Amino acid sequence: MASASDGWKLFLPYLSFIFVILYFTHSHFVTKLFIGSETVRIKKTPDLPLRFRSDGTFKILQVADMHFGSGIITSCRDVLDSDFEYCSDLNTTRFLKRLIEAENPDFVAFTGDNIFGPSTTDAAESMFKAFGPAMESGLPWAAVLGNHDQESTMNREELMSLISLMDYSVSQVNPWSDGLPNPTQHGITSNIDGFGNYHLRVYGAPGSMLANSSIMNLYFLDSGDRAVYQGKRTYGWIKESQLNWLRNVAIEFQAQKRDPLPFSDAFPPPAPPALAFFHIPIPETRQLFYQEIVGEFQEGVACSSVNSGVLKTFVSMGDVKAVFMGHDHKNDFCGNLDGIWFCYGGGFGYHAYGKAGWPRRARIILAELQKGQSSWMGVEKIRTWKRLDDEKFSRIDEQILWDSRLSR
Ligand SMILES: *[C@@H]1O[C@H](CO)[C@@H](O)[C@H](O)[C@H]1NC(C)=O
Ligand SMILES: *[C@@H]1O[C@H](CO)[C@@H](O)[C@H](O)[C@H]1NC(C)=O
């Protein structure tokens, strides 16, 4: 005889069954319909604009040629035999973390070959791993592409879009057209070669007379990958369209009002200096083999056979004081061409070719402000040094790249 309690015994499993169905429907279907906060994240952005610290400094870490592959399964190249077994891309990650921790920079500039395409089957994943420490640090960072970044699953435009959307990245695919003389055009300019041409302004120290003025400019240029010129294979180069854009940026930058002007006529402010970042060295870099340099020149300059007039353009612009490049991992020197310093970052990544026993390295650039009577002024000095990923974390080759008091 069925009692009322038997009905309840059946009802409870039935209720549980309904509940389970609802639960699965909700978790597997509903959350896909309604975008929850866990499935879509908005890019984290750093405090902007970039600005000098209240101690009057702005420090940049240059990372050249990480050549990141797939992570732990990607082995190291050109390390001592005794170091080979436990060495992978993770050593590259560790070095980047070590630098960020020890140098505490204000900004990180990646000068290309961030990933090594042939060693990954997923460019996006490799990029996220490579830039991971920068994204986690919360520091503003920017990157340009080298000649190996696009050698897997994404092209150069896609890579720069992805990089521009990563946490704390201030990279741009290409300049906004309001950097150009015709301000009626809006959006990204399409008439410029390459992907990853943009500029960033660095503002004066907080609370200073120049707190609302940009007093240093950072230029990023796409030096391309490979090309064929007059039937011969060669490396990419910076094109006239890019140089033309840059000239306009420099003109606009120098013409901007730096108000309120705390300077008298007897004490004109120095023109704001600029620093440029790109991957492939310019052909004139070869001349530095015969000149005095700081650092080491250990391999041929693998540049383009085309000289597109980058040096001439920089000289005529007048604001570029130093250029930071990568590409040749065994060169880590700074040399001066027509008054402008051209500096290699030195090979950074453990999966990149290098020289066994010659530690992986990175470059630090420090800009310092001039102290006025009551407040920080414009940039007074730019210096650089390198850090080696050795036991002592050696700091080497410190030099002054620009001193406004000597260039007046
Ligand atoms: C790579 O990292 C591992 C683990 O920390 C370390 O044992 C090894 O010495 C590193 N290799 C090099 C070449 O730095
Ligand atoms: C800069 O701008 C802020 C906010 O508008 C203002 O409070 C400050 O007085 C300005 N500083 C200078 C030096 O103009």
Image (cartoon, helix red, strand yellow):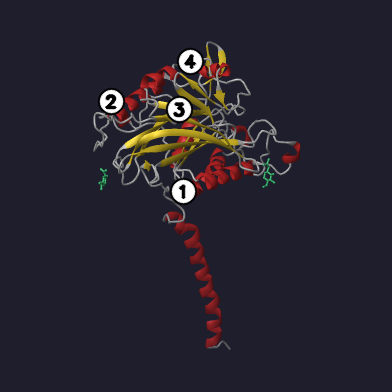
> Mark 3 or mark 4: which comes first in sequence?
4
* Amino acid type assigned to the residue bearing label 3 in the image: Ala
* Amino acid type assigned to the residue bearing label 1 in the image: Gly
Query: From this viewpoint, which residue is outermost toward the top?
Result: 230
Q: Is residue 200 visible from the viewing direction of this image?
A: no
* Amino acid type assigned to the residue bearing label 2 in the image: Pro
Disc 4 residue: CB within 8 Å of ligand 1: no
Tell me the distance, in whole angstroms, between the alpha carbons under discs 3 and 1: 26 Å
> Is residue 242 placed above or below 172 in the rendered structure?
above
How packed mark 4 is, by other alpha carbons closer than 10 Å (few <14, some 14-19, many 20 or more), is some
* SS under mark 1: loop
Tell me the distance, in whole angstroms, between the alpha carbons under discs 3 and 2: 26 Å
Image label count: 4
> Is residue 199 placed above or below 126 in the rendered structure?
above
Tell me the distance, in whole angstroms, between the alpha carbons under discs 2 and 1: 34 Å
What's the mark number on residue 322? 3
| Image region (quadrant) for ligand 2 | top left
* Amino acid type assigned to the residue bearing label 4 in the image: Asn
144 to the left or right of 78: left
Q: Where is residue 234 in the image (x, y as percent from the top left)?
A: 56, 18
Residue located 56% across and 46% down the image: 97
The residue to which callout 2 is attached is 181
> Mark 3 or mark 1: which comes first in sequence?
1
Q: Quadrant of the N terminus?
A: bottom right
Q: Position of residue 209 (x, y in %)?
A: 28, 41
Is 357 in front, or is 392? 392
* SS under mark 4: loop
